[in-house]
Amino acid sequence: MLIPSIKNSLKELIDVLEQMSNAEYSKPFHSLSNSSIGEHTRHIVETFQCLANNYESGVINYDKRPRNRVIQTDVSFAIAQILNIQDLLEKENKEMELQQIIDDVEIRIDSNYFRELLYNLEHCIHHQALIKVAILQSKTIFVNENFGVAPSTIEYRKQCAQ
C-alpha cells in the first residue's frame, strides 16, 4: 500500500506540472515566501533521490542534496526525474541510519527503508500542499481537490460526508 500511495502522489504532481510552462514553474510566489513551484518540486525530487542513492550504503542525510537548479527551472526535466523515482521505489526493506546535524551536533537515528519511504511520502504531500497554494492563484492550472491532502484527512472527510 505504501509504494502505490507514493506513486499516486507523484503521478498527481506530474499531472499538475504537465499543465505549466517553465515560466509558471519557476515564478516566485509571495505566498510561498518568494519560492517557486519548481523549488518545492526540486525539494520533493531530491529527498526521494537521496533515499534511492543511499539505499546501498544504508546511511541517509537529507541535508546533503545536490540542489540541482535544472529540476526547479525545467518542467520536462523535473517530470523525467519523478518518473525515474517511481521506477526506483520497489526495494526490500532494510535497516538504515538517518544522519543529521542539529545545533552543530550530529545525530544518528536508526530507521529502515520503509520508514524513510513513509517520511518521503508525508514530505511530498506537505510540499504539494504548498504548491497548491500557488496553483490556486492561477486560473489556467487545474488541481484535484485532494492534491496536497494527507490520506488520513481524505478518509476522515469521506466519513464526515456520510
Image (cartoon, rainbow, N blue to C red):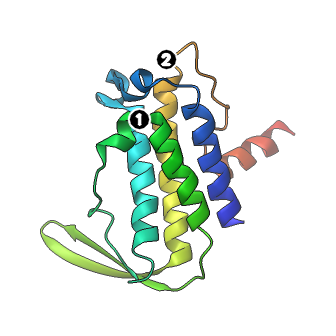
User: Seen in the image, is 155 located left or right of residue 73?
Assistant: right
Can you tell which of label 2 and label 1 is closer to the viewer?
Answer: 1
Up-down relation of residue 10 to residue 160 (above or below): below
Q: Nearer the viewer, residue 138 or 76?
A: 76
Residue 137, disc: 2
Specify the quadrant of the image occupied by residue 157.
Answer: top right
Q: Residue 8: image x %, image y %?
A: 67, 51
View extreme (top): residue: 139
Q: Which residue corresponds to the image point at 52% horizontal and 43% vertical from the top-left?
A: 79
Upstream in the sequence, badge 2 or badge 1?
A: 1
Q: Is residue 142 above or below residue 71?
A: above
Residue 121 percent across, percent down from the top left: 55, 57
Q: Are marks 2 and 1 in contact (CB under 8 Å)?
A: no
Inspect the image, locate mark 2, and give the three-letter code of the amino acid beneath it: Gln
Instruction: Give neighbour class at mark 1: few <14, some 14-19, many 20+ (Cα, 10 Å).
Output: some
Q: Element at badge 1?
A: loop
